Amino acid sequence: MIRSKEQWQSMLEKKLPPEDAAVFRNRGITAHYAGLYLAHPELFKWAGMAAFASRQVGLALLAADMLSSPGRLVSTGNTGSSSSELISALDVVGGALRSILSLPLWAYDSAVRSLLLDDLEAIRKGNNAIYHDISWAHEAYLCGGIEEISSNTGPGEELMLEGFGMIDEGRRCAGSDPDRSSELVVQGNIRLLRHEQIMTLGPVFESISPQGRIVVSFGSELVFSGAVPRGVRDRASFVEFSGFFETLTGMKSVADQSHRWQWIEGQVLPVWREVDRTFDRSHHLQSFLRKLVEAE
């Protein structure tokens, strides 16, 4: 064993800004995921998708900073945000306001507060928890192979170990059986995603208020615009997949693990596969991710 799990986690934690600098910290997490995928797109599919998911959390933090008192969720001072980030954050603001205006009147005030403050804070912590929970294993795999992960995992981490095992098997058979290799890597990364959704994000969503669950469901989407050429799907939206009325009434909620996974399997993963396939045939995805790395 090269390092213990705690040592791997500590090493990565030192590369990030402190937690009270939420926007900068999120930017560092996003950049780390983007860098992993750029360096190993044939293996680290989860990291590529996580870069876009983390970016959406960052835009929500910027949006909250615009709509709430400065310093509550982000550190004071200039965020160093680019004009494109601010424009994207304004889109998030518009989407949040449209969602809020769609809520029942009785939920209006509390929904605003819970979205921008307590519930968004829970989501921010969830983004940090994912980084803490899975990023170390990517670094451990690169330095010590599957053995470094297996010697550092325990109860509750079976899906993650299984996922990296499949990724490793896919890597080893890439030359002899490329089709099998590709499928193993894809399924291995889905195991990582499943681990993230069950073990890490499950408790986060359970802590969100009932009103906040509705608003967060409306805001749950993965946006790839600017990262793909024309003709490739660039958006996966929970409300579009689940239905406006169903989401508004709480019949469908991203906080519900089964509803969330239905959306992931039915829309998020198919869209991401289309995006991932453009990596070698278009400059869009690589250029977009490099900008995320450079923005750290």
Image (cartoon, rainbow, N blue to C red):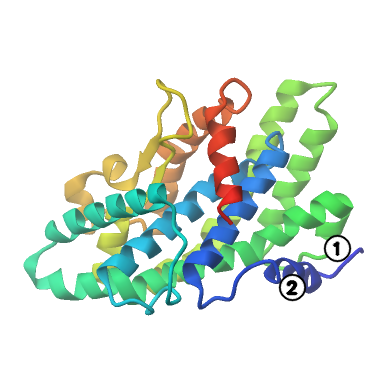
Q: Nearer the viewer, residue 51 or 108?
A: 51
Q: Residues within 10 Å of mark 1 (few under 14, many from 20)?
A: some
Q: Earlier in the sequence, mark 2 or mark 1?
A: 2
- Residue 179, above or below 147: above
SS for dot 1: loop
Q: Amino acid at mark 1?
A: Ser
Residue 223 falls left or right of residue 104 = right
Residue 209 seen in this snapshot: no
Q: Position of residue 41 (x, y in %)?
A: 68, 36
How many angstroms separate mark 2 from mark 1 (CA)? 17 Å
Q: Amino acid at mark 2?
A: Ser
Q: Which mark is residue 10?
A: 2
What residue sits 34% from the left and 76% below the top? 70
Residue 69 falls left or right of residue 198 = left
Which residue carries the number 1 mark? 151
**Which of the 4 quarters of the picture holds residue 195?**
bottom right
What residue sits 28% from the left and 49% below the top? 91
- Residue 277, above or below 266: above
Q: Position of residue 76 (x, y in %)?
A: 42, 77
SS for dot 2: helix
